[in-house]
Amino acid sequence: MPATPFVPGTAPAFLDHVRTAGARDLDLSIYKTFSIGEGKDLRFEVSSYNVTNKAQLGAPNVPGLFDVLNTPGVAGSFGQITTTVNSPRQFQFGARFTF
C-alpha cells in the first residue's frame, strides 16, 4: 500500500512543516487591471517567490552506522550541512486578456 499523508501512520519520514522546521519564504504578487472597452480587461501581473532570498539550511548529515563502517570518507561528513530547504529568488511575469 503506498504511503499517503491522509491516513494516520503511513506518512513518509519527511513532511515539510510537520517533522522539520520547513521553509519560510516571503512571496509577493502585484497586478494591475486595465479596462479595454465594455466587458474586456487586460491584466498584467508580477509575482515573486522568496523575495528576501534568504537561504534556509537543511538538516545536518547523520550517516547510519552501516554507512560509516563500509564507506570510506562518510564519517568525515558527519554533522555537515550541505543542502538548503528553500529555492532561490524567482520572478514570474504574466498577462491575461478577459473578454
Image: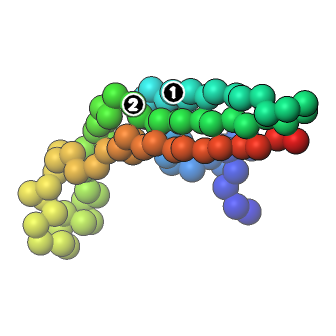
Q: What residue type is disc 2 on?
A: Val
Q: Residue at x 70, y 50 (%)?
A: 4
Q: CA distance from mark 1 to mark 2?
A: 7 Å
Taking the image as shown, residue 75 lies to the left or right of residue 17, namely: left
Q: Residue at x 63, y 36 (%)?
A: 44
Q: Label 2 neighbourhood size at 10 Å, few (<14), some (14-19), many (20+)?
A: some
Taking the image as shown, residue 34 lies to the left or right of residue 61, namely: right
Taking the image as shown, residue 40 lies to the left or right of residue 61, namely: right
Q: How many marks?
A: 2
Q: Which quadrant would the C terminus be assigned to in this image?
A: top right
Q: Can the viewer see residue 85?
A: no
Q: Report the residue marked by disc 1.
A: 28
Q: Position of residue 9 (x, y in %)?
A: 66, 43
Say whether disc 1 or disc 2 marks the residue closer to the N-terminus.
1
Q: Report the residue marked by disc 2.
A: 51
Taking the image as shown, residue 6 lies to the left or right of residue 22, namely: right
Q: What residue type is disc 1 on?
A: Leu
Q: Which quadrant would the N terminus be assigned to in this image?
A: bottom right
Q: Position of residue 21 (x, y in %)?
A: 41, 30
Scheme of image coloration = rainbow
Q: Position of residue 37 (x, y in %)?
A: 85, 32
Disc 2 secondary structure class: loop
Q: Farthest residue toward the front?
A: 37
14 shown above or below 2:
above
Q: Which numbered tag is attached to residue 41?
A: none
99 shown above or below 21:
below
